[in-house]
Image (cartoon, rainbow, N blue to C red):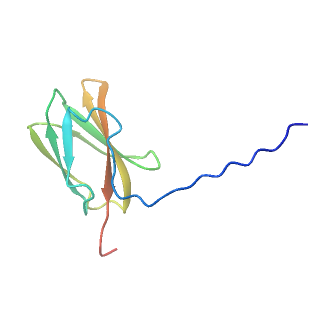
């Protein structure tokens, strides 16, 4: 018989969101936001995909300029992942928090 092991995890309040990777290829702001985000492209990025925390793809768009608007204002409150793509390769993943004050 195997002995039982207890593990305790302590979670503190979330006060900011860090990039998962590629902090020098794009900037995402404001974060948190009520749903309207700007993606400033600093490297070769030609599309972005936005996923809800449950893994659902909620938005796909081509990046046309250095500064791109991504509107998630119709989405629910929560954490979203922005996958920044160059051709078919993920260059960077950014976390964003949608936080509506009136919902």
Front-most of 31 and 65?
Answer: 31
Quadrant of the drawing holding the C terminus: bottom left
Residue depicted at 42% across the width and 46% down the height: 56
| Residue 6 image point, x, y percent | 73, 49
Residue at image point 25% right, 63% down: 34
As drawn, the residue found furthest toward the bottom would be: 102
Q: The N terminus is located in which quarter? A: top right
Corner quadrant of residue 84: top left
Please state which of residues 6 and 30 is positioned toward the viewer in this rendering: 6
Please give the name of the residue rendered at 11% of the width and 36% of the height, measured from the top-left corner: 64
The image shows residue 15, relative to residue 55, as above or below, that is below
Residue 34 in the figure: left or right of residue 95: left
Where's residue 29, x and y in %?
A: 19, 51
Q: Position of residue 57 (x, y in %)?
A: 37, 44
Identify the residue shown where x is 24% and y is 23%.
87
Left or right: residue 77 compared with residue 36: right
Tally of marks: 0
75 or 8: nearer the viewer? 8
Where's residue 45, x and y in %?
19, 30
Residue 58's place in the image compared with 43, above or below, is below
């Amino acid at each position: 018989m195997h002995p039982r092991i207890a593990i305790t995890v302590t979670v503190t309040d979330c006060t900011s969101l860090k990039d998962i990777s590629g902090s020098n290829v794009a900037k995402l702001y404001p974060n948190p936001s009520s749903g309207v985000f700007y993606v400033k492209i600093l490297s070769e990025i030609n599309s972005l995909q936005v996923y809800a925390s449950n893994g659902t793809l909620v938005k796909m768009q081509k990046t046309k300029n250095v500064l791109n608007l991504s509107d998630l204002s119709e989405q629910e409150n929560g954490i979203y992942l922005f996958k920044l793509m160059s051709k078919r390769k993920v260059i960077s993943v950014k976390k964003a928090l949608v936080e509506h004050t009136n919902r």
